[in-house]
Image (cartoon, rainbow, N blue to C red):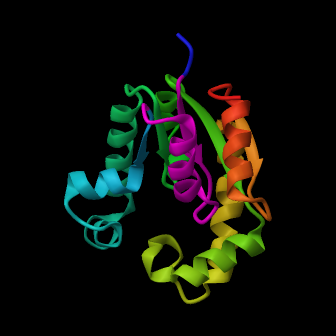
Amino acid sequence: MAKDSIALIGFMATGKTKIGRLLVKYLGKEYQFIETDERIIQEVGKPIPKIFAEEGELKFREYETSVCRKMSNLNKVVISCGGGVILDEKNIENLRKNCHIVLLKASLDEIRKRILKNGKESRPLIDKEDPKREIAEVLTFRDPYYIAAAEIVIDTTGKKIKNIVREIAIKTRLKT
């Protein structure tokens, strides 16, 4: 059976949510958009910063794995994955079952601008004293995981969103 879903992976602020929402519109009304972090919030009943503060990152990652396993059985979905989903190979194995895994990248400077513009408080992993340094360290650590998981890699830096959406649809062969 051909894959008919897309999992967007990448570091925070690379455009996964915004691009994912527009990609669903581009692919047609039979597609639906799902965001792993939003699903976790719905299932657990707490915002992510509160999960991190009260239960820790390991518990959050357990919730994330559960959500990825459930989503791997869905058809015609575009999934915006949390930035750390690639840290557990089980997540990637589950997503690969039915999804084209598309890595969205951006330059470090672009990521920093986007995150700091939106407020670091919403990003528990970088809500630190020196967020610029923290962003660089986390990205450097995760980058090999992103590359290993990706079927398709797209740099979003300086590109128009509509062009990125079209590129994803063509490269996944879900729409020409």
The spot of residue 51 in percent (x, y) is 29, 66
In the image as oriented, which residue stretches furthest toward the left?
45
Displayed quadrant of residue 134: bottom right
The spot of residue 13 in percent (x, y) is 60, 66
The spot of residue 50 in percent (x, y) is 28, 72
User: In front: 148, or 24?
Assistant: 24
Q: Residue at x 48, y 54 (%)?
A: 82
Q: Quadrant of the C terminus?
A: top right
Above or below, 131 relative to 6: below
User: In front: 144, or 70?
Assistant: 70
The spot of residue 47 in percent (x, y) is 29, 68
Q: Residue at x 71, y 61 (%)?
A: 140
Above or below, 86 relative to 128: above
Displayed quadrant of residue 114: bottom right
Q: Residue at x 38, y 34 (%)?
A: 71
Look at the image and say whether residue 29 sits in the magenta stretch. yes
Q: Is residue 127 left or right of residue 59?
A: right
Displayed quadrant of residue 131: bottom right
Tag count? 0
| Range drawn in magenta | 4-30
- Examine the rendering and report whether any part of residue 153 can be seen: yes
Look at the image and say whether residue 16 sits in the magenta stretch. yes
- Examine the rendering and report whether any part of residue 87 can be seen: no
In the image as oriented, which residue stretches furthest toward the top?
1
User: In front: 141, or 158?
Assistant: 158
